[in-house]
Amino acid sequence: MNRKYRKTIIAGNWKMNMLASEIKAYAAALKSVSASAKWCETVVCVPAPLIPGAVKAFRDCRVTVGAQNMSEHAVGAYTGEISGAQLRDVGAACVIVGHSERRAIFGETDTVINKKVLAALENGLKPIICVGETEEQRALDITESLITLQVKAALSGVSAAQMRRVIIAYEPVWAIGTGKTATPDDAGEVAKLIRAVVRKMYGARVARGVSILYGGSMSSDNAYGILAQPDIDGGLIGTASLEPESFAAIIKAANQ
Ligand code: PGA
């Protein structure tokens, strides 16, 4: 973390879990920790139908609410899709874009992800752009070129001014939901690479200000080590965000 230049962000990703009726108790359990976490911004990315309820429940907890996906289209005949304007309208502040589950299960390409990033920014949402390599790609030693490609493609057409609202999450695919985590040094190396790619595209000032998160089996046990890396500014947390107690423990670690 480097609090002089950028925000520390702890973001939960509930994925397709939780019900509207469970949010109030969750918010109450998180409140004492999140409300006093002065050094870190807490975000919870919830399933779209839960956004209005979450916005209401988290209002006094210093927790902002985000979405997990959005359409790359603005408006019109796209049955089942949800636009950036609609997410903003119900109170979402940010949106996860390009999560590896969407890339793998729903076939999202770098081109579509780029369109979603641009659409998010146009609608006043902060995109949390996910990049990461699979186990096979790591074994092939192509992590560096793959991450470079994913970052460059996702940011195509994003202005330097818009970069102030962009968050990038490094999520090695093999670490997501598996209990395996990248070592702090390995995660830190990739975060450093991502910042170098941003620096090449936008210059040192923009690169210095971008928050880069780590995601992939992050827990209260490994959070301290990972967050101690100078280029890692927070976490994107799936499994451990489903229980307010384990999520709160990571917020505490980030608030040290
Ligand atoms: P995990 O998920 O913490 O359960 O590994 C992280 C993510 O998919 O964002």
Image (tube, grey):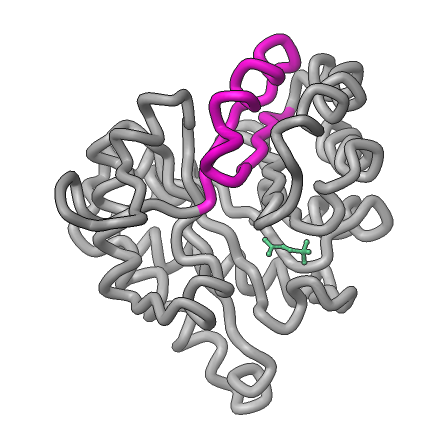
Q: Where residue 141 sits in the image (x, y, percent)?
A: 52, 86
Within the magenta stretch, is there residue 233? no
**Horizontal side, residue 170 vs residue 183: left or right:** left
Judge whether 37 appears above or below 97 on screen.
Answer: above
Q: Where residue 228 sits in the image (x, y, percent)?
A: 72, 46
Q: Where residue 234 sits in the image (x, y, percent)?
A: 61, 41
Q: Where residue 226 sits in the image (x, y, percent)?
A: 72, 51
Extreme residue toward the top, this view: 60
Extreme residue toward the left, this view: 76
Q: How many marks?
A: 0
Query: What residue is rendered at 36% in x and 71% in y?
Result: 107
**Residue 127 can be seen, yes or no:** yes
Query: What residue is rendered at 73% in x and 13% in y?
Result: 36
Question: Closer to the camera, 128 or 13?
Answer: 13
Q: What stretch of residues is rendered in magenta?
A: 40-68
Query: What residue is rendered at 69% in x and 62% in y?
Result: 177
Query: What residue is rendered at 21% in x and 46% in y?
Result: 158
